[in-house]
Amino acid sequence: MPDPLCFERVLAGLATPVVVFDRDICFAYANEAYCRSVHRSWDELKGRNPADLFPESEERMDAMRVRIRRAFEGEASSSDSAPYQIPGPDGQMLERYWRSRIVPLAGPDGTVTHVIQSGEDVTDEVMLRRQKDVIAAELEHRVRNTLAMVGSLAVVTGQHTPSVEAFVETFTDRLDAMSRNLFMISDNNWRGLAFRTIVEAELAQVVSIDDPRISLEGPDVVLSIRSTKWVALLTHELVTNAVRYGCFSVSGGTLSVRWRVEQTCFVVDWVETGRKGTGAPQRKGFGTQMLDLLPNVHTERDFRDEGLVLKITVTGPYHAPAGTGR
């Protein structure tokens, strides 16, 4: 080997882990950076075979042996983010990812006597890349779902509007409601929202939440993301109808929204008063059609003389798992 003094001075100060193997694939040298990276002292490594110190799968260990043997034949090689199992300081096994290069080290006569392996721990880089891939896949899924909702919204809106102008106005209004809800979900770290939050957000578009005509009461129920989207759109329709035809279209009208959980069901009572003699609509509107199409939703409508009384009962997975909001 080269002069040990010169060799160690160069390698000892490097931040890059460097290790040297002899022809028996045993440790002939390891700099301080390498010892720190594998949580071992040089005394623990000296003269030992890696397979004896680091429990690894035979497949991974065989791949490393092949690279080292080829290096003894004069062939350098590189690997990108290869996984390794390394015992941590507490004895627990840690999976780390290393980018490494193995090169032959020849003596004065040209014979390869040792192999040098230099490496870089790229575990954080690999984890970040995986996280980005997961986020990208999740974003793609959400975009597809949102576009599907927009498409359905356009079709149904077109069925209920008499003119292009009316379609543009109504469709744009509903898109605004969807956008508002998506921003709220995003601000909540892509978690579902509380039912009260959804109702207050839609009511705030037309009246003050402190308006004495409004009464909201119910437990803290956090909906799943899917339920949050549909409930927001449905609430927007109910509020819009209340402004056009119901309790908010007359002075003195009131709105009471009560919700509760009954066993496995989520029950909402939407009660409007003040607008008298409207009676049942001649045709089904968008909101009514939505309620009829949503799975696991049962609706009871009562168009009383004093206003609309609506009872909505949802069964099945309407809420988010505890602590997730998803």
Image: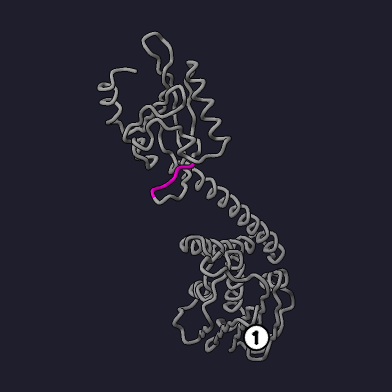
Residue designated by label 1: 309
Residue that lies at the very extreme toward the top in this rendered image: 109
Occupied quadrant, residue 113: top left
In the shown orientation, is residue 52 left or right of residue 318? left
- At horizontal 44% and vertical 45% (from top left) the residue drawn is 87
- At horizontal 38% and vertical 29% (from top left) the residue drawn is 19
Magenta stretch: helix, strand or loop mostly: strand
Residue 106 lies, with reference to residue 92, above or below; the image says above
Q: Position of residue 99 (x, y in %)?
A: 45, 33
Closest to the observer, 186 or 147: 186
Which quadrant is the N terminus positioned in?
Answer: top left
Closest to the observer, 157 or 202: 202
Q: Which residues are magenta?
A: 85-89
Q: Position of residue 53 (x, y in %)?
A: 45, 38
Disc 1 is placed on an element classified as strand
Closest to the observer, 230 or 173: 230
Residue that lies at the very extreme toward the bottom in this rendered image: 305
Residue 181 lies, with reference to residue 39, above or below; the image says below
Closest to the observer, 216 or 109: 109
Occupied quadrant, residue 48: top left
Q: Tell me the amino acid under the disc marked 1.
A: Val
Residue 54 lies, with reference to residue 200, above or below; the image says above
- At horizontal 34% and vertical 36% (from top left) the residue drawn is 43
Q: Position of residue 243 (x, y in %)?
A: 57, 78
Residue 114 lies, with reference to residue 124, above or below; the image says above
